[in-house]
Structures are given as structure tokens and as C-alpha cells.
């Protein structure tokens, strides 16, 4: 379950990231830790995300968070890159990873399968398209629970 502050924190972090040439791709607030940990995942919009990007974002976001006092108590801020082996969710990710090996999971069987492996072709409003040995497969988007890069290929 997403912490109720996450949308507000993402709204605050997004312009900070954009000013640095970065993109916020997600955030999690771990309130079960002492002190709580706010982790914000970023991606460099023009190249590989490096430690320098994380440091710049950390300094800039920390300053903004302190000024707004959204989180009144002590917390730890972590800035990281989500890495390559993760779920695809944004249109940009589907465009960026076109041709990559993916795993598509569905909520119920589609053509007798709930797990599909293939090369990502694209996603549109109604389907996720993959290629298996040159054969294009259109999986109904309403059945797709997630698409992730397949690092076992």
C-alpha cells in the first residue's frame, strides 16, 4: 500500500529532478523503519544514471523538503536508480526498451498462458505487443498485470 504522502512528495520532487535533467520514476516511504526512510528513484534523462546524479538530487531535494516541512519528523532520504531489471510502466519505458526481452504476466490465462516471454514490440491503448520467434502476439492490456525486463536472456 502506498503511503498517503507519496503523491505529494512526487509532485515536490519532480520539478527538482527536471531542473537537474533527471526524472523521478518512483518513491516509497518506509515508515516501519526507525527512523523512517524516504526512497526516491531517479533516472538521468540523457544517459546512464550515476552516483553524481543521486548526490545532486539528494542535496536539492533535501533542501526543498526541509523548506516545506511535509515530513515533520526525522527521516532518512535515499536517492537511487531503479536499475535495469524492473517493471516497465511508463510510455517512455515502453519506447526505450523496444526490442528488449520481456516477461508479460496476465491476471488470467490468455491463449492458455499467464506468463509470456518475448521481445517487446510496443504498447498501445488496448494491447501489449511482443514477438516470439518472429511471431507477433497482441496481449489485451486489461489482462496485463505487469511487464518486466527479462534478464535471463
Image (cartoon, rainbow, N blue to C red):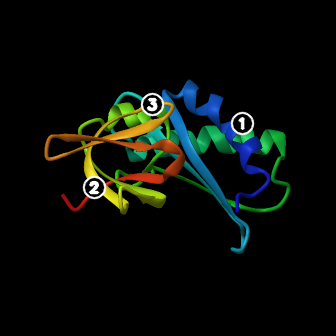
Dot 2: within a 10 Å radius of its alpha carbon, few (fewer than 14), some, or many (20 or more) residues? Answer: some
Q: Residue at x 79, y 54 (%)?
A: 4
N-terminal of the pair, mark 1 or mark 3, is 1
State left or right for residue 149 relative to residue 147: left
Q: Please determine whether, in this image, residue 137 is positioned above or below residue 76.
A: above
Q: Which residue is mark 1?
A: 12
Query: Are dots 1 and 2 in contact, CB under 8 Å?
Result: no
User: Where on the picture, by quarter, is residue 57?
Assistant: top right
Query: Which x, y percent locates residue 27?
Result: 61, 51
Q: Position of residue 142 (x, y in %)?
A: 54, 46
Label 3: element kind: loop
From the viewer's side, name the closer residue of 122 and 136.
Answer: 136
Label 1 – label 3 distance at C-alpha: 29 Å
| Residue at the image position 65 percent from the left and 41 percent from the top | 61
Q: Which mark is residue 38?
A: none
Say which residue label 2 marks. Answer: 117
Q: Residues within 10 Å of mark 3 (few under 14, many from 20)?
A: few
Q: Which residue is mark 3?
A: 124
- CA neighbours of label 1 inside 10 A, class few (<14), some (14 to 19), many (20+): some
User: Residue 44: percent from the left, percent from the top?
Assistant: 42, 35
Judging from the image, what secondary structure is the residue with disc 2 in? Answer: strand
Q: Position of residue 128 (x, y in %)?
A: 40, 40
User: Which callout, 1 or 3, points to the residue nearer the camera?
Assistant: 3
Q: Residue at x 67, y 45 (%)?
A: 62
Q: Quadrant of residue 131?
A: top left
The residue sitting at 75% across, 58% down in the picture is 3
Q: Quadrant of the N terminus?
A: bottom right
Q: CA distance from mark 1 to mark 2?
A: 37 Å
* Secondary structure category for the residue under label 1: helix
Q: Viewed as shown, does residue 75 lie left or right of 53? A: right
Q: Of circles 1 and 2, which is in front?
A: 2
Amino acid at each position: 500500500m502506498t503511503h498517503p504522502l507519496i503523491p505529494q512528495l512526487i509532485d515536490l520532487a519532480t520539478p527538482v529532478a527536471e531542473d537537474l535533467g533527471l526524472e523521478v520514476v518512483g518513491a516509497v516511504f518506509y515508515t516501519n523503519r526507525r527512523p523512517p526512510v524516504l526512497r526516491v528513484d531517479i533516472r538521468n534523462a540523457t544517459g546512464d544514471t550515476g552516483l553524481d546524479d543521486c548526490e545532486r538530487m539528494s542535496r536539492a531535494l533535501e533542501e526543498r523538503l526541509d523548506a516545506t516541512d511535509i515530513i515533520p519528523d526525522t527521516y532518512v532520504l535515499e536517492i537511487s536508480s531503479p536499475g535495469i531489471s524492473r517493471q516497465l510502466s511508463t510510455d517512455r519505458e515502453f519506447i526505450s526498451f523496444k526490442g528488449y526481452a520481456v516477461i508479460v504476466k496476465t491476471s488470467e490465462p490468455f491463449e492458455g498462458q499467464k506468463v509470456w516471454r518475448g521481445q517487446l514490440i510496443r504498447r498501445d491503448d488496448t494491447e501489449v505487443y511482443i514477438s516470439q520467434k518472429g511471431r507477433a502476439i497482441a496481449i489485451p492490456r486489461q489482462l496485463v498485470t505487469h511487464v518486466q525486463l527479462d534478464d535471463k536472456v
